[in-house]
Image (spheres, rainbow, N blue to C red):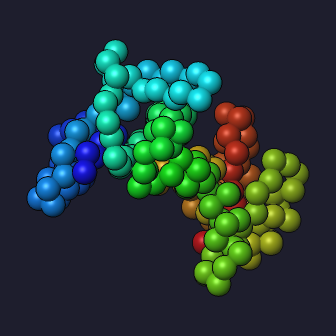
């Protein structure tokens, strides 16, 4: 099988481990930098070019798309999908995983333990929102933060208000969760 691993850095441990595991199973593996693709959209003929050249046949794609290139990375994965290539992680699943609120909404449909969570853009509702999540203390999270960036424990209503006001001042969406 001809496998492409989309990764910005072939030398990353996780990328190397995936590549080595696939090769041990007899697959042909190419690690390709997601940002080096050009996408050609045309009627009934989706195409991808890598470093200016057609990519050639691909049977499967393993996306390793960092948060900083989500928009472009999803476009590349969608193009592979349009070309009928199997993608280990579908573009829609990646997009949902990057949106904490959407992820929680999907998980809430099932019997999965979730912390009480509120999403609001109204600064004057913060006190009531904190009560709805049994706080303070509360956890304030950026909706699109990753790897712990943009996560703050607010011990009081005043602290939460300051954090939320600062995030809203940067035009960021936030979640308030039970701690």
Left/right of residue 19 with respect to residue 128 in the rendered view: left
How many labels were placed on the picture? 0
- x 18%, y 46%: residue: 28
Which picture quadrant has residue 2? top left
> Percent from the top left, x then y, of residue 62?
35, 49
Q: Residue furthest top?
A: 52
Residue 167 locus on image (x, y percent)? 67, 42
The answer to whether residue 1 is seen in the rendering is: yes
Q: Is residue 5 left or right of residue 143?
A: left
Residue found farthest to the front: 44
Q: Residue at x 51, y 21 (%)?
A: 40
User: Residue visible at 34% across and 15% down?
Assistant: 52
State which quarter of the image contains the C terminus. bottom right
**Could one spot residue 166 in this view of the protein?**
no
Q: Viewer-proximal residue, 45 or 8?
A: 45
Residue at point 65%, 84% (across, down): 111
Figure quadrant of residue 119? bottom right
């Amino acid at each position: 099988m001809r496998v492409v691993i989309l990764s910005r850095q072939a030398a990353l441990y996780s990328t190397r481990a995936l590549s080595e595991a696939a090769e041990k199973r007899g697959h042909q593996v190419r690690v390709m930098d997601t940002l080096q693709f050009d996408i050609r959209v045309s009627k009934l003929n989706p195409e991808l070019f890598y470093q200016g050249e057609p990519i050639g046949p691909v049977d499967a794609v393993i996306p390793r798309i960092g948060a900083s290139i989500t928009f472009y990375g999803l476009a590349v994965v969608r193009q592979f999908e349009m070309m009928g290539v199997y993608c280990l992680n579908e573009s829609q699943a990646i997009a949902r995983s990057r949106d904490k609120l959407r992820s929680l909404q999907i998980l809430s449909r099932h019997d999965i333990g979730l912390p009480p969570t509120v999403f609001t853009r109204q600064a004057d509702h913060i006190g009531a929102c904190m009560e709805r999540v049994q706080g303070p203390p509360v956890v304030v999270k950026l909706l699109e933060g990753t790897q712990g960036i943009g996560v703050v424990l607010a011990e009081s209503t005043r602290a939460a208000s300051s954090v939320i006001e600062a995030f809203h001042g940067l035009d960021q969406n936030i979640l308030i969760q039970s701690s």
